Image: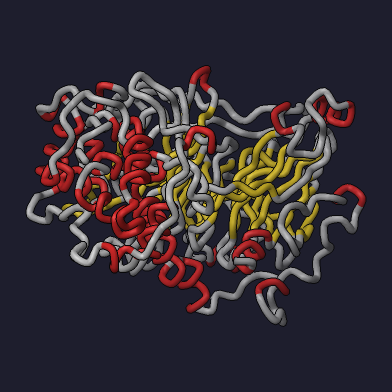
């Protein structure tokens, strides 16, 4: 049997997409497309006594630098800027987004399917190969090229044939032929990769596509969102479970608000009324078994823009629409008071509970000891605990490097988002971010007495905005612009900050895309979760239990609007709606405190009142795993 049959180099590009193009498709999705039934696996060792050890799927090219690896891999893939021609780019453009998506698919292939590259037994071989099918539980369904990832470009090489021999023994030819026909498309075309060439490509992808942003020009204006989560996210979340700010604050015995006397984290805030105990909040708790939502406070004013809270959950900051000097508020839940201040809006609290930022004529960086001292109001320009800076722009969010590193702020292009006060809203904020959009990353040091912002570092992120940094300052997520200035989804990037003199060299490789829309999100302190609000539109009618957007019961949402709170699992991209707000009720600006409880505010259209609400939904989801 020829190893090169039914495979050209363009297959790698095709194999990682879900669309039908000039070079073929991903092999289909129905049993009817699968061809003749493949034989059952047999124990091959007795039939193939000389099969020997497995060849290498690929040999890592550790001898190549990142620059050499990126240059050679891109040339093999067909990038003319690196000396390549007419390979994968015959069918698909080699864009950053596409390559990052291929990486995410390939990471899933290695992490979930090809988990024993030594092919230690016939059973293991069969399980690994079935994992690449449309339905891994049904070995009569087709092999899916997206499940094979970048390794489709090595489907004709020795490792895959060996795995089929191990799984099927002398009957291997038919399933192997089916595999090649499904993932090794299109027919004919360019010369297949040799094993040494494939080693270079596979090494570049498994190394995380180093220097891809530097080697490829900026992508064109995005027109679609292709979801994908790379292995870098799983590694990061696993690390944050023991070293992130949720774990650190727990180790430091940070006293969480409302948890005194509680047997565990689920017992926190138990003295506050549960949502549903009042008519206006009935039915809010949905889609998470055991979820509890608590109403922490009713505010007698309309806040402006977003809400954020301190790591311990005691202080809740907002802007307001009040005129005059005191245009911001910080609620002290412990004292049940609202502290007026001369700043305007955009609260942000550092994850170690040490300080906070509010925007005024400049940005004010303040020690949290100011709030603990129980002030009756805050002037920001006269308190010794505060320092102003013009290095931190509007709509900032903050994090803190682990291990005693610097604090960080991120800002950039943004879309103002404030609704549910007097005017209804039935669509998410626009995403009119330009090709010249960039991240403004500002290191902030604490001198022992005050926070001092350093020089800002700018990193190009075309068509992305509303950026939010993770609590560890290791990740950043942005909303992505699509056609008509509508959002396509979210792009998550790793922040790689290398000290250089008194500043940093920063790169931001993409690690995930989540194809769900809403307002700017917030990270949990263990960085497992993202939370955001999404304004209810016609497309949400069925999810809310209506037959369609024409259902008479949905009419109230059309006229009054509403917003719900959602959780996104950073590991999988799975989305869970955790509220069911009534028409005219806007659950907005959700965010986490350090122990995993969520806070948000609820605005009720036309009333001028707001409620601060808490939920243990993310904690319940974690506990159910």
Asked whether residue 140 appears in the rendered view, the answer is yes
User: Toward the viewer: 98 or 383?
Assistant: 98
Residue 302 in picture, x, y percent from top left: 74, 40
Q: Classify residue 609 by image quadrant.
A: top right
User: Toward the viewer: 346 or 139?
Assistant: 139
Left or right of residue 564, residue 583 in this image: right
Residue 118 in picture, x, y percent from top left: 26, 64
Residue 101 in picture, x, y percent from top left: 37, 39
Asked whether residue 466 appears in the rendered view, the answer is no
Residue 71 in picture, x, y percent from top left: 13, 37
Tell me what residue is drawn at x 24 percent, y 33 percent. Answer: 5
Q: Where the N terminus falls, by quadrant?
A: top left
Tell me what residue is drawn at x 46 percent, y 57 percent. Answer: 471
Q: Residue furthest right?
A: 279
Tell me what residue is drawn at x 15 percent, y 23 percent. Answer: 85
User: Toward the viewer: 460 or 156?
Assistant: 156
């Amino acid at each position: 049997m020829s190893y090169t049959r039914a495979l050209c180099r363009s297959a790698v590009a095709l194999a990682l997409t879900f669309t039908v193009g000039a070079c073929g498709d991903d092999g289909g999705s129905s049993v009817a497309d699968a061809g003749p039934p493949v034989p059952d696996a047999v124990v091959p060792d007795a039939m193939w006594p000389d099969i020997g050890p497995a060849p290498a799927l690929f040999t890592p090219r550790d001898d190549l630098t990142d620059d050499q690896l990126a240059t050679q891999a891109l040339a093999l893939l067909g990038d003319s800027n690196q000396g390549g021609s007419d390979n994968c780019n015959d069918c698909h453009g080699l864009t950053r987004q596409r390559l990052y998506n291929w990486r995410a698919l390939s990471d899933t292939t290695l992490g979930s399917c090809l988990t024993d590259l030594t092919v230690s037994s016939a059973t293991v071989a069969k399980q690994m190969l079935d994992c690449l099918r449309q339905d891994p539980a049904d070995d009569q369904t087709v092999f899916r090229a997206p499940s094979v990832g970048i390794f489709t470009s090595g489907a004709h090489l020795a490792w895959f044939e060996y795995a089929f021999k191990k799984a099927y023994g002398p009957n291997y030819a038919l399933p192997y032929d089916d595999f090649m026909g499904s993932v090794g498309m299109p027919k004919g075309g360019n010369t297949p990769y040799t094993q040494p060439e494939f080693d270079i490509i596979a090494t570049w992808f498994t190394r995380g596509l180093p220097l891809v942003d530097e080697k490829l020009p900026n992508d064109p204006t995005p027109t679609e969102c292709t979801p994908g989560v790379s292995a870098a996210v799983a590694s990061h979340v696993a690390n944050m479970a023991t070293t992130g700010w949720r774990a650190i604050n727990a180790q430091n015995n940070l006293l969480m608000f409302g948890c005194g006397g509680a047997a565990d984290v689920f017992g926190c805030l138990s003295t506050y009324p549960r949502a549903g105990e009042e008519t206006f909040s009935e039915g809010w708790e949905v889609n998470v078994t055991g979820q509890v939502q608590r109403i922490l406070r009713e505010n007698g004013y309309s806040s402006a823009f977003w809400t954020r809270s301190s790591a311990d959950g005691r202080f809740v900051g907002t802007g307001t629409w009040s005129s005059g000097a005191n245009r911001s508020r910080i609620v002290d839940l412990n004292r049940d008071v609202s502290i007026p201040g001369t700043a305007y809006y955009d609260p942000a609290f550092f994850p170690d509970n040490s300080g906070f930022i509010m925007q005024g004529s400049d940005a004010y960086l303040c020690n949290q000891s100011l709030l603990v001292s129980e002030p009756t109001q805050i002037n920001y320009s006269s308190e010794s605990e505060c320092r102003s800076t013009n290095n931190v722009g509007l709509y900032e969010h903050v994090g803190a490097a682990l291990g005693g590193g610097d604090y960080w702020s991120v800002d950039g292009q943004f879309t103002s988002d404030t609704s549910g006060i007097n005017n209804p809203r039935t669509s998410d904020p626009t995403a009119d971010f330009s090709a010249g959009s960039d991240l403004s990353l500002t290191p902030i040091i604490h001198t022992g007495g005050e926070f001092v912002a350093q020089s800002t570092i700018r990193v190009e992120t075309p068509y992305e905005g509303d950026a939010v940094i993770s609590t560890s300052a290791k990740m950043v997520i942005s909303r992505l612009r699509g056609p008509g200035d509508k959002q396509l989804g979210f792009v998550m990037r790793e922040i790689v900050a290398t000290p250089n003199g008194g500043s940093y060299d920063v790169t931001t490789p993409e690690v995930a895309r989540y194809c769900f829309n809403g307002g700017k999100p917030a990270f949990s302190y263990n960085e497992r979760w993202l939370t955001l609000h999404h304004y209810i539109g016609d497309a949400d009618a069925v999810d809310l239990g209506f037959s369609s957007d024409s259902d008479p019961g949905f009419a109230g949402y059309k006229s009054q609007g509403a917003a719900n709170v959602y959780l996104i699992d950073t590991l999988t991209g799975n989305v869970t709606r955790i509220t069911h707000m009534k028409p005219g009720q806007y659950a907005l600006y959700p965010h986490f405190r350090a122990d995993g409880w969520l806070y948000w505010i609820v605005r009720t259209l036309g009333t001028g009142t707001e409620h601060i609400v808490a939920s243990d939904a993310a904690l319940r989801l974690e506990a159910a795993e």
